[in-house]
Amino acid sequence: MDKSSLIGSILGVICCVLVGWMASHGNWGMFYSEKGLIMVFGGTISVVFMALPMDRIKMIPGYVKRFLFHKSMPMTDLVQLISRLSERARRDGILALESEMANVKDPFMAQGLKMAIDGVDPGNIEQLMRMEIVAMQDRHKSGKKFFDLIKLYAPGYGLVATLIGQVGMFGGLASADIGHLGHMLAVAVVATMYGTVLANAVAGPMGDKLSLRSSEEILNREMMLQAILSIQAGDNPRVTQSKVLAFIPAAQRTKINLAA
């Protein structure tokens, strides 16, 4: 479980519930609008189906799971693993890394190491692994696109529901029915609230987190690629470690060196 995602989600719910209770004094029914729900949530779902192909829509549960759970190997553990593999390859030869493959949990790194052990040309290894990175980046863009669609169009459908409510309100002015006018005004305001909350409290932060995770994973995989090529080339373990540390911010390098 990603702790920051969990903490942020809980804080957001607490703030909405607390302010809602203070405004309604416990009368939660005033925040319910069937027409607003149909327009905002139904309209936003329709946009998702129009904008995304069906195979990407089937991946939506995975996007949410990626927001809540972060599976990447900690940077310290990754640097230690690369250093150990580099030292073993330099001491016993690259074929000795076959016995270390059980300790390599990341599929991307395991694939690269297997090719290096099998003697595949470094140029081919780099080409194939970069294709993997590009494909992964494309999948991650789909997740960001899904949340961007909600962020963009949910407020728009809230505005449509608001305009419909206002038309109904103006249309009822002749009858001077205060109850009808109040109901239509509530539809207008509540629908706007639904769209705003969905866009800014849910879809926006989740999309931004996926974008950040994608950037981190691309950097990690680039680091793994350079480490594998360095190990295959027979570089000194210190040189390999220096190449790996070049991908890490200077402020974190001291901590990783101390941990190692």
Image: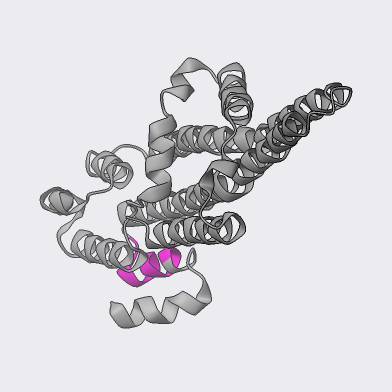
Write down the region rendered in magenta: 235-244
Whether residue 123 appears in this view of the structure is: no
The answer to whether residue 22 is above or below residue 165 is below
Relative to 148, is 108 on the left or the right? Answer: left
Q: How many labels were placed on the picture?
A: 0
Image quarter of the N terminus: bottom left
Q: Nearer the viewer, residue 59 or 123?
A: 59
Compare residues 25 and 83 and report the one nearer the observer: 25
Of residue 214 and residue 80, the one placed in the foreground of this image is: 214
Q: Residue 241, how many percent across, how many down?
A: 37, 68
Residue 242 % position (x, y): 42, 70
Q: Residue at x 27, y 68 (%)?
A: 80
Seen at 28% across and 42% down, the residue is 107
Q: Position of residue 141 (x, y in %)?
A: 55, 36
- In the picture, which quadrant includes the C terminus? bottom left
Specify the farthest residue to the left.
99
Main secondary structure along the magenta-highlighted residues: helix
Residue 254 in view in this figure: yes
Occupied quadrant, residue 223: bottom left
Q: Is residue 85 left or right of residue 41?
A: left
Q: Is residue 144 magenta?
A: no
Q: Quadrant of residue 91?
A: bottom left
Question: Viewer-proximal residue, 125 or 151?
Answer: 151
Residue at the location (47% across, 23% down)? 57
x, y percentage for residue 79? 33, 66
Residue 258 against residue 37 in the figure, above or below: below
Q: Is residue 28 left or right of residue 84?
A: right
